[in-house]
Every structure is written in structure tokens, then in C-alpha cells.
Amino acid sequence: MAMRRSSHLSTVQPEVEALLVPPGMDAVHVGVSLEETALNEISQLQVSKVFVMANKSSKPLVEDFITTLESKGILAAPINCDISMGGAEDGLLKACDEAVSVSADCVITIGGGAVQDAGKLVRLWLSAAHTDEKATVKGIQAAQNQEPMPPLPPQICCPNSFAMAELTHVAGLVTKDNVKSGAAHKSMMPNVVIYDSNLSRGMPDWVKFGTALRGVEHAVGAVCHPDATENIRVRALKGLTFVNKGLLGMAKDPDSEKAQVNCYLGGWMAIRALNTGCYPSVAHLIQNHYSARFNVHQGSCSGVLSARILHYHREDSLEHQKRISEALGKYDGEAAPSLISELVATLPGVAKDHADTKVDTQMLKDFSDFMYEKHGAKLNRLSPKPFESAEGFFDMLTLPLESI
């Protein structure tokens, strides 16, 4: 199937045409009707047992769509809303078992990053599970190593926010021990993405602004990554410009379609740049573990940590950080960490410091010891400036914001 892009918004068409559809994906549609576009894609995929997963907050927005699927006889089961923040193990395994029990041949995911990633893992399990076999995390992860990898059921992603999990072949989950884990395989790339801004309207601030802030994080991570090429940096900086414009627009009007589309387009550019040889960035690694350990939404992880991490390696990534400042609209030499900190301060619903996430000094000390002991070598491969000790990592985490 040829790779396709579409948009009903003439003002963004040039940017849509300039974007790369990820390898393994058939189509990305931006600013279109979910129901009309999804039904067309279902028809093209020639599937008949559609398993729908959604955030609880998204369920009321797609009731008509679910009714339409049911009337056509292609809804495999009642809509599944078991996936919680971060993709907690219990809800994921329940969804996997339900999808197998109805022999689903297509997965539609409606919601944020946790639901999009869970859909990839459900597809992976569908490719490997026997009829009566109960899903386990180990079983799902073993399925990513099948050789040869059998075809996975197709996935249609309908995001309600800007986390961009739908544009990658990586899927995260959180185990019962609050450890970030997951799976990855190129076959896990979703087939179709449909971004209908109506799904974003009315979302809580911590979701809307937090996931858009992740677009900033993805762009910054790609620009400063030791393995980034000039092409990657240019694409990431372009994405950063769009996300910044979108965030400023949503701050004025949270339901502005133009602002939301800017956030989505910029986030798309940023995540594609990051995933072109630069995933994960050092901030991504740190924030993923902070999120899993302390049960904090990743948008708030970026709010608390992004400026601190940039400040830590500023001397070793100074030229790249100057370009970040310019992408944020500042040409007077103002430092990128302070610009990020100032941007975060304007965003409703996003944590600004550890006190907001209820993470105290001892918790941060223990986290520093864990990260340096378990992930020190990886941290230092990813960071422009290595961490020499757990104490140095702790100092970065606890840097007073007023010092940035």
C-alpha cells in the first residue's frame, strides 16, 4: 500500500506534505474526521473483527463511532477502557486476553500514549498467543523475538493528545513493581494514524499541555543527542518551532484547532527526528524512569526535569542550545534552559518542581543511586556531558530552578 498523508486544513497542507510517513506505516491523516476516515481505512484493510481500546475520557466522544461499528457487524467486543496511565501491567494483560478471546483482526486505539502503546503490545500478543493462553509480560516480550515475525493485525491509532507514541514501533508498559519496560519491533509500527482535533478538545490541562510539552522534549533531545546528524537537528528544530507556536496558542485558547494542529505537526516532526537514530535521548531515559518510579505523567516529568537536564550539559552542547533558543524565538543569547523553564511556568496543569509531584529529597537520593548503578553507562552514552557519580546525578535533579 502506498504511503499516504491527508489534511482538511489548507493552512497546514504544505507542512503535512513535507513530513515523512514513518517506515512501515501506510497513512497519517491530520485534522480530519475520525469516523469517516477510520471507516475508509477499515474498508481498505479488509478486516471484520475490530477491537477498540480507549481512554475512559475518550469513550464518550466516540460513542457514535462505536455504534456504527456495531451496526456494521465488525465490532469484536465492547470498547475496552482498561489501560491506565503509563500502561500498567494489569490493564494491559486484561486487554490482551480479551482481544485473543474474540479473535480480533484489527486494533483501533483512541487516546493518549499509554493506549497507543498498549495497542501495539496487544497486536504483538495476538500474533503469538494460543487460544487459552493467558497473557504475561514475559510472554509479550518473548513475542517480539519471534523468527520469523508473523504479520501483526493492523492498528489504526486515533490520538487525543500529542505524546506521539503512535508514530513509533516502540511500546512501553509499567510492571507491577513500577518499573518501566516494554517491547520493540519494526512490525509493531501502527498502520494508520488519524488525528481529529475534536478528540483533544476538553482534555484536562495536564494531558493537553503535558503531552505537547513532550514534543518540546523530543525536539531538544534530538538536537542535543551525540548521534544526531545535521538533517536530524534541522527537522527537530522545525518541529520545536511548531510545538512552541502551538503551546503559546493553546495557552490563549485551549481548544484552538490551529494551535492543536501546530502541536501535532511539530510533535510529529520532533519524534520522527528523535527516532532516526537518536532514541532514547538522555532526558527521555531519565524521565521514563522517573515517571514509572513515582507514578508521574511524563509531561510533568518534562516540566520538572527538562530545563535541569539541559542546564547540566549546557557547556558541552552550547552550540546546539543556541539553535534551540532561536527556534523558541529568542535571538539575544538567552539560554535555552531558562527559556524552557519560562515556557513550563506558563503551562497549566504541568508540574514545575519535585514538590508538585510529591517526590522528596530522600526519594530523589534513592532514585539517583538506582539510575547510576543500573543505567550509568547508558546515561553517559546519551548525555553530552557524562555523570561522574550518583551524587552528580542527584545534584542535577535538585538544582534550584532559580539557578537556571
Image (tube, rainbow, N blue to C red):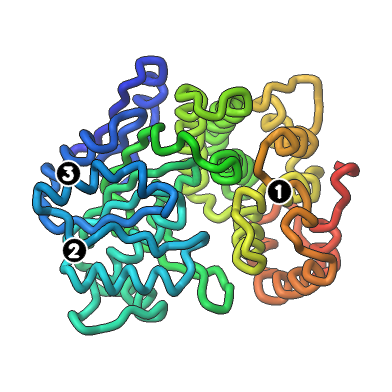
Is residue 93 visible in this depiction of the protein?
yes
Q: Residue 295, located in which quarter of the rendered image?
A: bottom right
Q: Residue 222, located in which quarter of the rendered image?
A: top right
Q: Residues within 10 Å of mark 2 (few under 14, many from 20)?
A: many
Q: Is residue 94 left or right of residue 149?
A: right
- Quadrant (top left, top right, bottom left, bottom right) of the N terminus: top left
Q: CA distance from mark 3 to mark 1?
A: 39 Å
Residue placed under numbered mark 1 in the picture: 351
User: Mark 3, mark 1: which one is toward the viewer?
Assistant: 3
Name which residue type carries label 3.
Answer: Thr
Q: Residue at x 36, y 28 (%)?
A: 31
Q: CA distance from mark 1 to mark 2?
A: 39 Å
Q: Residue at x 52, y 46 (%)?
A: 274
- Quadrant (top left, top right, bottom left, bottom right) of the C terminus: top right
Name which residue type carries label 1.
Answer: Ala
- Disc 2 is placed on an element classified as loop
Residue placed under numbered mark 3 in the picture: 68
First in sequence: mark 3 vs mark 2? 3
Is the residue 27 above or below the residue 11 in the image? Answer: below
Is the residue 23 above or below the residue 361 in the image? Answer: above
Residue placed under numbered mark 2 in the picture: 104
Q: Residues within 10 Å of mark 1 (few under 14, many from 20)?
A: many
Name which residue type carries label 2.
Answer: Ala
User: Mark 3, mark 2: which one is toward the viewer?
Assistant: 3
